[in-house]
Amino acid sequence: MTSYSKEVLGDLAAGKLPWPQTRRIMSAYKDDDRFFKMVAVYQDRVAWKDPILLPVSDHLFICQSGDKRITRCECGHSFGDYRKNWKLKAAIIVRNTEEALREIYPNSDIPDPQWMEIREFICPECGTMHEVEAAAPGYPIVHDFEPDLEGFYREWLGNPL
Amino acid sequence: MLDKPASALRLRERLLDSERLMEETGCYDGITELTLRNQDPLKFETLHTKLRAYCVSAREMARRISASPGVREVGEMVVAIYTPEGDAIALSNGIMVHVHTMSRFIKWMIKNNYEENPKIREGDIFANNDAFIGTVQVPDVMDVVPIFHEGTLVGWAGAVCHELEAGGITPGGDVCLAQERFTEGLFVCAEKIGENDEIRRDYVIRCERNLRMPIYWVLDEKAKVASCIDMRESVKQLISEIGLDYWMKVSKEFIEEGRRAQLARTRQLTVPGIYRGHTFYGHVTAGKPGFQLLGDPDWLYNIPIEMEITTDGKITMDFEGTQPWGYHSMNCTPAGMDGGMFVTLTQHMNFEGLVNDGAWMATELKLPHGTWTNPDNEMVATATSWALLLPAYGVFQRLLSRGFVARGFVEEAFVGQVNSPMIEMGGESQYGTPFGMAHFECAAAGSGALAIADGLDTAYVGWNPESDMGNIEVWEQSMPMVYIGRSIVPNSGGAGKYRGGCSFVSTWLISKTSHLRLHTSEHSSRVFDNGGMCGGYPAPTCQKHRAVRNSNIHELAAKGEPLAHAPGIDPHVSDYEKNIGGEHVVVEGPYITSPHKSGDIFSHSYNGGGGYGDVLERDPIKTAWDVENGYLTREAAIQVFGIVLKDDAHGYPLADIDATVERRAAMRRERLAKAIPVSDWIDAERSRVEKADFAPEVKKMYASAIKLSSRFTKDFSEFWTVDAKSIFMPGAKP
């Protein structure tokens, strides 16, 4: 069975693994022990102790915090119950003018701000940009991901929560 | 008896029986046990590998028969082998989107009783390019031939080429001016076009009389038929070795195995749950010549997708809330939607094991009736389905990637494909003859970023995983234009920790013609039709067209003056305007205008991919390399990424790490100072929503979505705590 060390997976996640090695991992049979090893990699990366249950973005994790399961930023900021849309607890910058769009696209044609805006969802504590939405004005904020956490641990990992 | 089916049942009955068995058992054709695989797994795998080799070899052979640079250079072809009921057993590489659309074509003929009339006999050749029967758009012409073994129908061999000219209202095949099917081009609707392995002369004459460049279509037909015959003969030989009974069983077990492999792969790589995303497309045609006023000229399309992965591994994609079909060329049929799903799965999940129609059977598409995904009017045009299909399946790629990230397989996460604005042309060639052609260099856009690396530059499109822009010299042989530039578009990859792949721009001098019609499609310049992921930005919108009529380029060249080879990096004034005299034109949306002639200049940009991760985490060293090599401007490096560059002794950019750290800390502080709580923004924005204070196209988009979808209406109303219907459809019944 294919398996990689935690160090190799840590480098992979950090984009530090040499490309030929990365390419081999991409082409090889997948390692069935990946999930828990990768969770361990992330657990080492964060300063807090709550056990990570699921990574959901580059710096966002669902974790067990006491008897609650919450979405937490790598910096430790809590976005509350993991079943709720974390974006509603984030800070936001909306780019809906030519000037604001031009800041990100200085040398290109840009969309019509009457038709489209950019929404940047930011951790209010550390300022990390967790997600960017490009949407028509008035479009409801999307709830990206509602994992079936219980089903995942019970039926796919064989390790009920 | 040449048309005797394999069992006592007629083909149609056998197909219905197979569907019933699937319904009852949940397994393909009722195969609950992979008996042959379990008996001799090595033989099982070897046979499938042989079938795949037959397909790959037949396609490569056929590409050398084709006259079209699309097929020869760019590989716009795929072939596959099917069961008698029309389910794909094995396929080649290439434009795999059509493997399942051909399946629909075969099933359509069976269900429409082709056994009775026009009959299915050994040596017959059937062709189709009707998307409501089974393809994506008119230029995707498919040919299938039945495979008989000692008088018994034992399967089908099929091949598809994308034709460079389809005889529509404008030259090429992605006919953006088509507003109904009647202007899309030459339709071949599940037609028997040949017998005894020979294409009928009257069919060839019809092609010759109705196409601008029949040599492409007709030689591609010959290439496809040759590949089908090649596969057919290989399968017949195989059956003589393994026996008919074994073939009939094993070919179906391959598909059931493919279905199980897809479910297993989903369980292995993702996390069950609900995934959501959306994208948009802006169709701008107001004031453009040739468009009939059959509806509003400008449209904003929303494409929301909800994907569910259940714990059994099934993936369901639901398009509820999207827009209605329209009098434009971007509608898609369920066949095209299936094809998009299939080609995406083959790239992201089926990279090992048996790849066939089984993968498609492990998924489900929910395509709301009346929308562009499933029009309730079969007169609609689908000539540029890809305009909406590509953004939609780009969302699918991001949704899947969210699952890969969550599961820890970061190396598989990919921000996705982008649209491929295509240029097509016709008129008088450089040889003084009539011609027509789609330029397929668009088959090499920038890809979305990965979760661990930058996207591929000029090297990926979702619809042809073997992406290739083709050689300049080959394209120049086929059109009255010569390249004066083909270069990377700086900043065309979406910004992020890992940037999207960059695109390229071509600049041509029109040459040796007095009448060149140039048209483009899939051109969403007013909104982003791609996205970023995990904090990455979308790639820029489709860039506007820039052309110079009656240019003084020959005079400049004679004097040895500098020319312009690309639009440059000033979005307000292009390098063409700075360096070249003449009538400068900037066009948004599809390029539909009066013919060009020798001495004019035309440029066309392709799209880059979206970014991944927070820009403030981008590697400064990589950024210096990007700037040095023209992938990024200095302006963007400091302004977007917060990376301070200085010059080394030779004037090359060098990252100033200390200054970058300082600048980024300041940018982070600026972000925090500028950002407001989302709840505050919602409260402030609600009054705008209540007043429907939006551009007319935005209001129309909401009204259309609300009319078609109670779920969209409910979600919108609950999010803003408003009554969406009364705002956007005042006077409508509650």
Image: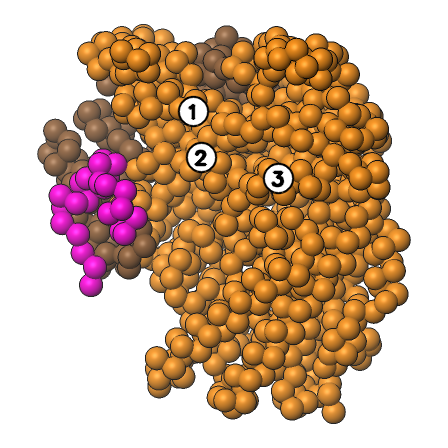
Chain colours: A brown, B orange
Q: Real-space Cα distance between discs 2 and 3?
A: 21 Å
Left or right? Give the position of A76 relative to B599. Answer: left
Q: Which residue in the protein does label 1 denote?
A: B631
The image position of residue B309, as x and y in percent, is: 41, 52
Asked if badges 1 and 3 are on one and the same chain, I answer yes
Q: Is residue B731 visible?
A: no
In the rendered image, the quadrant that contains the C terminus of chain B is top right
Chain to which mark 3 belongs: B
CB contact under 8 Å: marks 1 and 3: no
Q: Mark 1 against mark 3, which lies toward the viewer?
A: 3
Q: Which residue in the protein does label 2 denote?
A: B457
- Residue B408 drawn above or below residue B41: above
Secondary structure found at label 1: loop
**What amino acid type should be assigned to the residue bearing mark 3?**
Glu
Q: Earlier in the sequence, mark 2 or mark 1?
A: 2
- Residue B57 drawn above or below residue B545: below
Which residues fall within the magenta stretch?
A1-25
Asked if badges 2 and 3 are on one and the same chain, I answer yes
Secondary structure found at label 2: loop
10 Å neighbourhood of mark 3: few (<14), some, or many (≥20)? few
Q: Earlier in the sequence, mark 2 or mark 3?
A: 2
- Residue B571 drawn above or below residue B167: above
Give the camera-side residue of B44 and B672: B44
Give the camera-side residue of B586 and B117: B586
Give the camera-side residue of B224 and B349: B224
Left or right? Give the position of A19 relative to B32. Answer: left
Residue drawn 68% across and 14% down?
B558
Residue B538 part of the magenta segment: no
Kindly identify which numbered label has been placed on residue B473. Answer: 3
Residue A12 part of the magenta segment: yes
